[in-house]
Amino acid sequence: MATRRAFIAGLIATGLSPKPTWADAGSPAFLSAAKKPDGRYVLCGLRADGQIAFELVLPARGHAATAHPIRPEAVAFARRPGTYALVLECADGRQKARLEAPKGRHFYGHGAFSADGELLFTTENDFENARGVVGVWDAQHGYARLGEFGSGGVGPHDIKLMPGGETLVVANGGIETHPETGRTKLNLSSMRSNLSYVTLEGVIDAQMELAASHQRNSIRHLAVAESGDVAFAMQWQGDLTDDLPLLGVHNKRNPTPRLFSDASGRTMQGYLGSIAVNNSGNHIAVTSPRSGTFQIHSIGGPSETSNLTDVCGVAAFGEGFVVTSGTGAFRTPTSGDTTHNLAWDNHLIAI
């Protein structure tokens, strides 16, 4: 009887070898960038119980990542205004590709795959023209760049695929920046953010812009429910005497968003760091590392507030949520805290 090794060798020789899956990468449920005590940066896969499934070295600080919908691949994005994104084989740690932003562009730290995993979309800054763009990459053929299209605004940050797989939603934060001035905000007096719904071909299908009183609310992060509701987290760029909501929900069938006053600028110190929607779409979670606050909002009901120092990453965990913090904590609703000797970065991405 042939050995298993010989059997697999035969499959490889005939081109029928089994394709790796996320189980081959240790069955992670989440991705998060982190900083190690020695100053190195890594991308980690985390299991649902908070244990680390894999840890891959990054060349610089990461921001968010996105997981391929089929293959055990993750794209790790540099923090804005970074110009790199790494495509990592999570099963064996190899670097599959390195994406470099074209001349005159930088990444904003987020990306999204098409439903079939054949295309990757990245939010980018065309900084000489103060214009947001979405880069398009061929995930089937070495992540070659195929082109780009307008994001529908300035400062596109987060990007998500909408249910049905035919449209992207982009959080255009409205803030103009330029690498020559680092992270300095150049247009606060005139900034306007929006949500743009864009087809995969780059046609703007719908847009939502906040009322003039919210002119300095920058829409930054998104979570999408199966119903098509888009929850959005904002960061206030003005004086906190203007105590405006930082959380909203929009559906492109209704031009007016719903805003949640409990997630106010003063309560959250003007800053929401991450957002998630649970599996049923009836609860939204937001975090604020500045205030050390984690809130869960019920659609049509009251909110719950918890405290965790430097909390920022959040992701759905069934009907509840898990959160991470810069202190190394990984908190689930069932098993409490697991603490790692790592400083988790801004985002926890569900696979």
Image: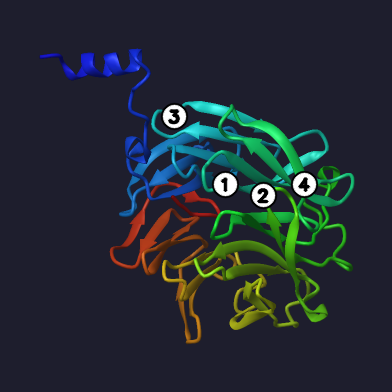
First in sequence: mark 3 vs mark 4: 3
Residue found 37% across the figure and 69% down from its top: 319
| Viewer can see residue 77 | yes
Residue found 63% across the figure and 73% down from its top: 250
Q: Could you say where residue 211 lies in the image, as x and y percent from the top left? A: 78, 79
Provide the residue designation for mark 1.
114
Provide the residue designation for mark 4.
149
Disc 2 to disc 1: CB gap under 8 Å: yes
**Residue type, label 4:** Phe
| Viewer can see residue 293 | no
Element at badge 4?
A: strand
Disc 3 to disc 2: CB gap under 8 Å: no
Q: In this view, does 258 lie above or below 224?
A: below
Q: How far separated are the C-alphas under marks 4 and 1?
A: 15 Å
Disc ID at residue 93? 3
Disc 3 to disc 4: CB gap under 8 Å: no
